Amino acid sequence: MSLIPYLCCVLALTSAAPALYAARSEAQISPRASVALLSASDVAAPGQTLDLGLHFRFQPGWHIYWMNPGDAGQPPRIEVFAPAGSALGDVNWPAPERHVDGPITTFVHQGEVLLPFTVTLPPALAGAAALSVKANWLVCKDICIPEEGVFRLALPAGSPQDSAEAPLFEAARAAVPTRSEWRATVDAQGVLTLEGAGTGTLQAADFFPADWGRVEHGAAQTLSTTGDTARIALTPGPDFDPEKALEGVLRVRGADGIERALWVTTPGASTVRTPALSLAAADALPPAAPASPVAAPADEGLLWPLLFAFAGGLLLNLMPCVFPVLAIKALSFAKMGGDHAAAVRLQSLAYCAGVVASFLLLAALLLALRAAGTQAGWGFQFQSPVFVAAMATLLFGIGLNLSGVFDIGARLASAGESLASRGGLAGSFFTGVLAVVVATPCTAPFMGGAIAAALGAPAPVTVGIFVALGLGMALPYLLFAFFPAVAAHMPRPGAWMERLKQALAFPMYGAAAWLVWVLSQQSGADGVLHVLAALLLVALAAWLFGVAQRASAGNWSWRGAAALALLAGLLALGRTPEPAATMPVAQTAEGAYSVQRLADLRAAGTPVFVNMTAAWCVTCLMNEKVALSTDAVQGAFAARGIVYLKGDWTRADPDITRFLQSHGRDGVPLYVYYAPGREGVVLPQILTPQIVLDHIAS
Amino acid sequence: MNTQAALRTGLLASLLFAAAVHAAPRIGEPAPAFTAVDSNGRTVKLSDFAGRTVVMEWTNHGCPYVQKWYGGGMQALQKDATGKGAVWLTVLSSAPGTQGHVDGPTANRMMKEQGAAPTHYLLDYEGKVGRAYAAQVTPHMYVIAPDGRLAYMGGIDSIASTEVNDIAKAEPLTRLAIDAVLAGKPVAKAQTRPYGCSVKYAN
């Protein structure tokens, strides 16, 4: 097979991504809402009107406010950055819903809502139209959280054409109140009278005043009908004035049982309202979105996440998780020292393809999980005990092979070390695969943002980010291909190689031991027993297989026994217990994180330091060792009365996943310091005692 | 004769009381009477402050609008008002289990940490004071003139937002009302739109 067309294909996919998501911006996701900017058209036509909208999807119970929020709350504010000469319409508000909470009545949007508005582009628009929106909104359930975001769209010039989002705009149009044909008047007592065909048979009516205080928002409204007249008794509010126009939405149910939303205006001067929208020149670029919640990627939307992903992938090579595999590959390159440069180049490309293919697979898995509504994060696969047990067994098997218990012939393509050490393109390809599998728990510093962007981004962007990660990780090997001199300087094969190979078994054993420890956190003693049984059976299989390889003849019974032992080992693995419902979390003096605990402590004005960690996260363990558990830091915590809360993400925990996402992260470590009465401050992913002390002192 | 007059007065008083309980408070009318316990366990009555200017502030420290004001603006307003002789009552109507609910000692500690200086911090967990004043949001502001009549109710200022920077740009409605009442002048904008989070009443 030829790998170059394949790689070209991957690169083409990455560069094509922006065009694929033009009608929908990157979403901003918080535990409360997912928000994105949509366009009804895929194309921006100069001089024509473009239908745009801010699309909110809420978690159950959360809502934003209508143009008149009612007794409390605040409607969203939207600032549009459009090409010079553009004109802006106001938000075409869909009809609200009434939300009654004791003596407080508010007018809200919940579930899902599109706030549509129009931008008329200048006739002399050259090239693509870049449109940005900066918005802030108050999202409330029992409590209120202010959120904000920056959303960007780039639409190519041309004649308008419906985008994939157009049906949402159609639905929104149906939700916007139509202007009432009825004659509406209001008297000094606040009775709203409607005259015209159909008014006499109204079954129900609910009036939502467009302006605050014109009528009491929560007061009962009594409907009475006679002939062609409907009267709705409203209670005048503090700003009531029958001489001024009373405007608002009337939700009515007719005799046919059909509900409609009408826009009603009584005679008189209209109230001047502050529009929800404001316009700014496109070149007055909005400042970067805040770090929390998940920020939309800046600039061209795709460039930065891809760059960060690429840098993150490059750094992954230096992470302890990847290093053992890197060592193996270095060994195989060393073996090839005498080969032609062209062969080396092909090997590198095969490795690169292996890495990229694995990342593509991860992206596909992530997208599938995300589609299934699973709260997935980076390193999530390490939350499955069976996966951890299987990884431990695989690394142990690789170690046994490196130790020389058994050999895998150059022609055998099976799992594990053979994949890593075997010559040929397939061997290089699977080395790449293995490197990725082992690297997943190491969230390199640059990767957090990229993954967060990938999780919130449309599917093609997610794929692009994962491909960039893979390319970054494979870069050192590609360098081998393009600079043959480097390969020529590789050490020559010799006896040292065997010793090196044997020595490399020990990082493998170490990694396996570490994974067994991780498993002990996940599945407890039973899990450890299962994985140790699996290791024992794999060791037996390896030894039997080695005996078979060394026997001159009649080795099939040995091989059969080896296969049986291996099968038994795999069965033991498959039965690794899932996490128990109440598993003891590794703790010292610190408390365990819970949403309630953090809320209570913050409510009480207690300073809190939150450490989100996982047993399989090496960076987390290092940070705890060198920074958090030092006397200086612990002493400072004690002196300042800071409560140290630790969240353990070793096993899947939706609360922690949400906490991470609300801080723009999808992996551990995450450190957040809450000073009394302040919002949380996120610390860097690599800690020193000084960094911690500086943050808690500010 | 005297008995009849007393009866008539009593009837009138109970009618007024009923009106105060059931109707929304009105500018220019007697402010609803109340009795409440403060964060130090002391019983506080509105009638204790007869002849003085009383400022009432509804609070909930978890509300982003309250947090905006406790960045310093509220403390300054409190110090200024109490320094000029006004009584400042911070009222907490968050029911147990809702946002902002704290006990007396915690309220005292928070006030100390924030540098807040109300005359009393009232614990209105059942929402009796809040409902009597129809307090809807945090912060919802009321100013009662020395004659016991309600002189101001509404927003703390004119820009409904959670942005601290907006305080300087907004019309300081509550400050203007306090200063007018302290100076014995009518309040120009006596009823304004309150903004903030909903008060977390017990259901």
Image: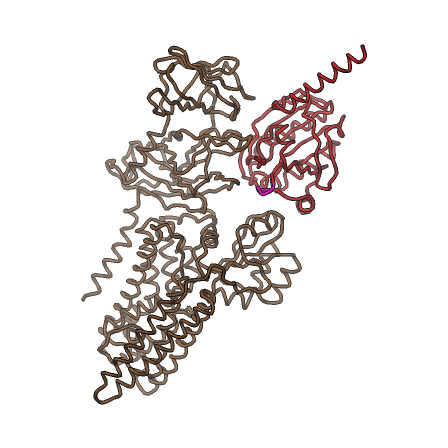
Chain colours: A brown, B red
**Residue A75 in view of the camera:** yes
Locate residue A590: give its quadrant: bottom right
x then y, percent, for residue A32: 45, 44
Q: Nearer the viewer, residue A255 or A74?
A: A255
The quadrant the N terminus of chain B occupies is top right
Does the magenta run of residues contain A351?
no
Q: Is B180 displayed left or right of B203 in the figure? A: right
Asked where in the image residue B198 lies, by quadrant, the reply is top right
Q: Does any portion of residue B189 appear in the rendered image? A: no
Determine which quarter of the picture holds residue B92. Answer: top right
Classify A40 as above or below A559. above
State whether the magenta stretch is mostly helix, strand or loop.
loop
Q: Is residue A518 above or below residue A124?
A: below
- Residue A455 in picture, x, y percent from top left: 38, 52
A301, above or below A445, in the image: above
Magenta stretch, residue numbers: B96-100
Number of marks drawn: 0
Residue at image point 38% right, 79% down? A504
**What quarter of the picture does the C terminus of chain B occupy?**
top right
Residue at 64% over, 44% down: B102
